């Protein structure tokens, strides 16, 4: 059993004792805390919250608990049913709701679920707001509505509205996509991508679609995180079906992985790079990604005469930096595309539409498009520590050791070398330091990570 309470929401495995797993009591407690926090934000007669969920088996149960709790607080619920995370975010904006809750554990296996919490802008909460909700949940300072003041539930389907919003984006060229005659293979891991991607692609003019795992029944056919080692089925299908491009999404459809026509990986890190290159070619400006994302985005941005900035890891931090720098495109190297012309949230539907437009206008194979971008290779490792290790002090020593290099310490320690970088982040849940490194070859990236481990060990 596992229960992780953080400023971004509550995540855990279904079952177990209260406080040890994501039990019904924990769902009610945190839904109540969120509702009370919502009322603290403004004094009004009525409040409305948008509720959406992915296709996890536990979804209907958790949905019932959350909706009823909000009703019990006198809050009206706009229930989207099965809906992607970006669809729910967009619905908060368009409905002018006071907030939103997304029931999804993202890329975690099926035994997990979570309450992801949104503000009235359809964006994830700030650290301060998240901390307040944790405080309210701990104190259980809840007061529920009297019988005549209970909230109401209204059901509304927003998938088609989301698709029309994507089609309406200025840089989405439906005619170019239709003329290209793409054959597209998709893997939706039997979650809500199955209700969103096929109609999106048809609306974009794609007539030939090969659907893998598009039944939203919550039975994930493989590890739902869209990493190369989990994508053998679509890789084989690309060559068998002679597809032009493949798309894989995670269970809540905020991450997008692209597959080349020959079954090789375009690279999850390069989803944002390619989409940003296209956007920057039409809308000059700045870009943002987190510290652990590929340097290729910086290179492409500077080639387009823009400025690149890095944020701390986490979507809320990327969004804050994008607003600060007026970025026209941004996101995370895990395949998360954030396009402010649509909304400030990672959106695989927007990513697909922009990528297909880019590919169509280039008139190249997907693998040929990939070759246009700087080639970097990433290695991800971890150094296990003892429970008594002072991780902050250890990272401070590393920072001092590399004081003559370009060092960023807004989120752990990142050291930029001329042709490579390494990012060290401590875990908040276990005694380890995560080591992300990137270089011009896999061997160099792994060697850099190994060197950094030895340096840290020398200080322990």
Image (spheres, grey):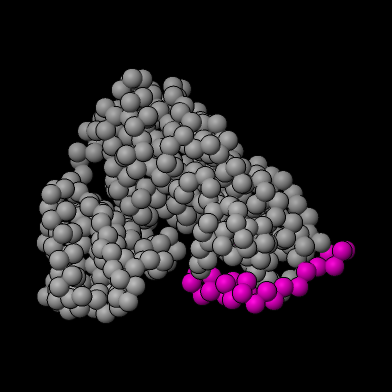
Number of marks in the image? Answer: 0
Residue drawn at 38 percent across, 66 percent down = 430
**Side of 218 where 380 appears, left or right:** left
**Side of 26 where 269 appears, left or right:** left
Residue drawn at 72 percent across, 61 percent down = 70
In this rendered view, identify the residue nearer to me: 120 or 144: 144
**Side of 369 where 183 appears, left or right:** right
Quarter-of-image position of residue 395 = bottom left
In the image, residue 215 above or below residue 110 = above
Quarter-of-image position of residue 243 = top left
In this rendered view, identify the residue nearer to me: 83 or 373: 83
Residue 263: x percent and y percent?
29, 29
Residue 381: x percent and y percent?
25, 56
- Magenta stretch contains residue 21: no
Quarter-of-image position of residue 38 = bottom right
Which quadrant is home to the C terminus? bottom left
Residue 116: x percent and y percent?
55, 58
In the image, residue 222 above or below residue 311 = above
Q: Which residues are magenta?
A: 120-149
Residue drawn at 33 percent across, 61 percent down = 290
Residue 123 visible in rendering: no
In the image, residue 149 above or below residue 374 = below
In the image, residue 217 above or below residue 269 = above
Residue 18 visible in rendering: yes
Residue drawn at 68 percent across, 74 percent down = 140
Residue 285: x percent and y percent?
32, 57
In this rendered view, identify the residue nearer to me: 2 or 143: 2
């Amino acid at each position: 059993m596992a229960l992780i309470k953080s400023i971004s929401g509550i995540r855990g495995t279904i079952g177990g004792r209260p406080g040890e797993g994501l039990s019904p009591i924990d769902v009610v407690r945190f839904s109540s805390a969120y509702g009370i926090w919502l009322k603290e934000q403004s004094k009004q007669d009525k409040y409305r919250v948008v509720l959406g969920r992915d296709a996890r088996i536990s979804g209907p149960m958790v949905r019932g608990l959350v909706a009823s709790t909000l009703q019990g607080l006198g809050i009206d619920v706009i229930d989207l049913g099965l809906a992607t995370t970006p669809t729910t975010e967009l619905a908060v904006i368009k409905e002018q709701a006071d907030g939103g809750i997304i029931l999804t554990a993202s890329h975690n296996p099926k035994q997990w679920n979570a309450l992801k919490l949104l503000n009235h802008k359809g964006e994830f909460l700030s650290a301060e707001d998240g901390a307040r909700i944790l405080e309210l949940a701990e104190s259980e300072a809840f007061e529920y509505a009297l019988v005549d003041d209970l909230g109401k539930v209204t059901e509304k389907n927003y998938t088609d509205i989301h698709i029309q919003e994507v089609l309406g984006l200025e840089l989405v060229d439906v005619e170019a996509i239709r003329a290209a005659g793409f054959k597209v293979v998709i893997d939706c891991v039997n979650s809500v991508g199955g209700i969103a991607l096929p109609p999106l692609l048809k609306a974009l003019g794609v007539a030939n679609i090969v659907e893998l795992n598009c039944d939203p029944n919550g039975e994930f056919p493989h590890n739902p995180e869209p990493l190369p080692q989990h994508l053998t089925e679509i890789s084989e299908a690309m060559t068998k079906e002679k597809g032009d491009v493949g798309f894989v999404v995670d269970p809540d459809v905020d991450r997008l992985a692209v597959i080349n026509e020959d079954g090789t990986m375009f690279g999850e890190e390069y989803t944002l790079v390619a989409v940003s290159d296209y956007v920057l070619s039409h809308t000059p400006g700045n870009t943002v990604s987190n510290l652990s994302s590929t340097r290729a985005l910086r290179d492409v941005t500077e080639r387009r005469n823009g400025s690149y900035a890095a944020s701390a890891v986490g979507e809320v931090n990327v969004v804050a930096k994008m607003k600060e720098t007026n970025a026209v495109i941004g996101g995370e190297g895990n395949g998360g595309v954030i396009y402010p012309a649509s909304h400030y949230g990672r959106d695989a539907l927007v990513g697909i539409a922009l990528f297909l437009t880019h590919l169509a206008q280039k008139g190249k194979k997907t693998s040929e498009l990939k070759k246009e971008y700087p080639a970097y290779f990433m290695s991800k490792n971890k150094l296990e520590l003892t429970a008594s290790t002072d991780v902050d002090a250890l990272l401070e020593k590393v920072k001092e050791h590399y004081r003559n290099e370009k060092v960023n310490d807004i989120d752990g320690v990142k050291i930029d070398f001329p042709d490579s970088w390494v990012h060290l982040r401590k875990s908040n849940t276990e005694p380890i330091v995560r080591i992300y490194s990137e270089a011009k070859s896999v061997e160099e990236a792994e060697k850099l990570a190994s060197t950094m481990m030895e340096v840290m060990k020398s200080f322990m």
